[in-house]
């Protein structure tokens, strides 16, 4: 049972990251001889399989970064591609689970007897036995559950934090691909220590995914409340409402309009520093990656996505603080100080 649960856990990790990146990592490791796959799964180390998975990986990753160039069209393409890829998750996670069983046997020789006893593969045809089908189905079910929660959490977090589209898409793509590499490396290392740790890793990933889902729900709740408050403020106290909206775009201007020069000047200086860093970072990143020109666009997009996340986070934080200050000093329904 140790081998079965560990293999299911390894396959289930696909759902928490980019499924094609996970398969690419395993395929490359098998091709380089770093891991040894069971005989029926050795096709995953062939060039044709790596090429196919690499193509699918590019199809899922490219639209996320292309939103910077054609926001409306590429955001729609990105959504469709990820929706379709969701139907491939059961296959990719099943492959990962079945391959993981062979890797586990080779890194933990004491499991070899268990592997031979449960007979995951038919010795004559190389097909799946009942145990092999159970591992594939368990991995697929686990990965689909994680993928579903992740798919629901991403748009909620993007909408709630104001980063939908050109910012959230590349940020999520980077996070998923980084998670794929990290999780595959962790899975291999933990399997060498104790295969049961893979089950613990899956449990931790599940808790993190649930936390992201809960955070997304909370962000939607905050978004609904915040938008409602701003809209009411725009109706009853237009100048105060506009000050809150402007504060998100140019930190400090809203505070200056609300007669708080001290905080306004500090936030405006911070906004100026952010703008200077944003402008200066473009040539710096290009120069750092000049030795490998193909990496320059990805590096620039990654750096800009990070800076835009900082911009949105700081802008939202300052605008919310101003909104609370406005509501304290001039509750809805009373004349605003700034409107005088």
Image (spheres, rainbow, N blue to C red):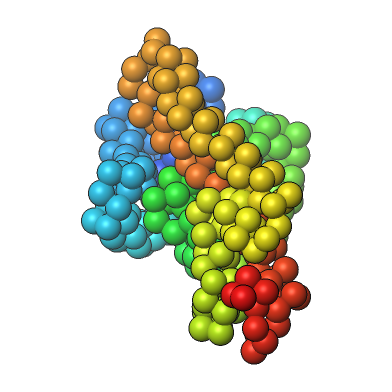
Q: Which residue is at a point 55% across and 57% down the rendered structure image?
A: 248
For the residue pair 109 and 189, the one nearer the viewer reads as: 189
Residue lying at the far bottom of the rendered structure: 333
Q: Position of residue 24 (x, y in %)?
A: 42, 35
Q: Is 257 left or right of 235, judged from the image as shown? A: right
In this view of the protein, which residue sits in the foreground, 200 or 193? 200
Q: Residue at x 27, y 57 (%)?
A: 72
Q: Residue at x 66, y 51 (%)?
A: 264
Is the C terminus in the top left, top right, bottom left or bottom right quadrant? bottom right
Q: Residue at x 60, y 60 (%)?
A: 257
Image quarter in which the N terminus is found: bottom right
In terms of image quadrants, where is residue 233?
bottom right
Q: In this rendering, does residue 314 appear at all?
A: no
Q: What is the total number of numbered labels drawn onto the structure image?
A: 0
Image quadrant of residue 316? bottom right
Does 245 appear above or below 169?
A: below
Residue 67 location in percent, x, y? 32, 48
- Comparing 111 with 244, the one in front is 244
The residue sitting at the top extreme is 291
Q: Is residue 333 above or below residue 256?
A: below
Q: Position of residue 290 (x, y in %)?
A: 39, 13
Q: Is residue 192 above or below residue 201?
A: above
Position above or below: 149 against 298? below
């Amino acid at each position: 049972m140790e081998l079965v649960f560990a293999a299911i856990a390894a396959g289930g990790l696909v759902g928490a990251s980019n499924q094609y990146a996970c398969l690419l990592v395993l395929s490359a490791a098998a091709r380089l001889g770093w891991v040894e796959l069971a005989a029926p799964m050795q096709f995953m180390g062939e060039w044709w399989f790596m090429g196919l998975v690499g193509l699918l990986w590019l199809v899922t990753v490219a639209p996320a970064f292309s939103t910077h160039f054609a926001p409306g069209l590429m955001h729609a393409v990105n959504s469709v591609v990820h929706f379709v890829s969701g139907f491939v998750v059961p296959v990719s996670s099943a492959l990962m689970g079945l391959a993981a069983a062979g890797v586990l046997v080779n890194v933990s020789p004491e499991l070899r007897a268990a592997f031979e006893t449960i007979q995951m593969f038919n010795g004559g045809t190389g097909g799946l036995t009942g145990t092999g089908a159970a591992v594939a189905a368990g991995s697929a079910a686990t990965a689909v559950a994680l993928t579903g929660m992740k798919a629901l959490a991403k748009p909620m977090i993007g909408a709630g934090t104001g980063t939908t589209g050109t910012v959230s898409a590349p940020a999520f793509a980077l996070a998923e691909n980084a998670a794929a590499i990290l999780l595959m490396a962790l899975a291999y290392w933990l399997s060498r220590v104790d295969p049961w740790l893979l089950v613990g890793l899956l449990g931790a990933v599940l808790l993190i995914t649930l936390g992201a889902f809960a955070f997304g729900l909370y962000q939607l709740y905050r978004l609904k409340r915040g938008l409602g408050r701003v809209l009411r403020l725009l109706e009853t106290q237009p100048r105060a409402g506009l000050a809150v909206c402007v504060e998100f775009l140019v930190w400090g201007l809203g505070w200056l309009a609300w007669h708080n020069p001290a905080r306004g000047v500090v936030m405006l200086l911070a906004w100026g520093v952010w703008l200077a860093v944003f402008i200066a970072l473009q040539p710096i990143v290009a120069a750092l990656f000049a030795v490998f020109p193909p990496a320059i666009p990805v590096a620039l997009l990654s750096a800009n996505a990070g800076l835009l996340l900082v911009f949105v986070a700081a802008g939202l934080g300052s605008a919310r603080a101003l909104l609370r200050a406005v509501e304290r000093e001039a509750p809805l329904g009373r004349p605003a100080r700034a409107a005088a």
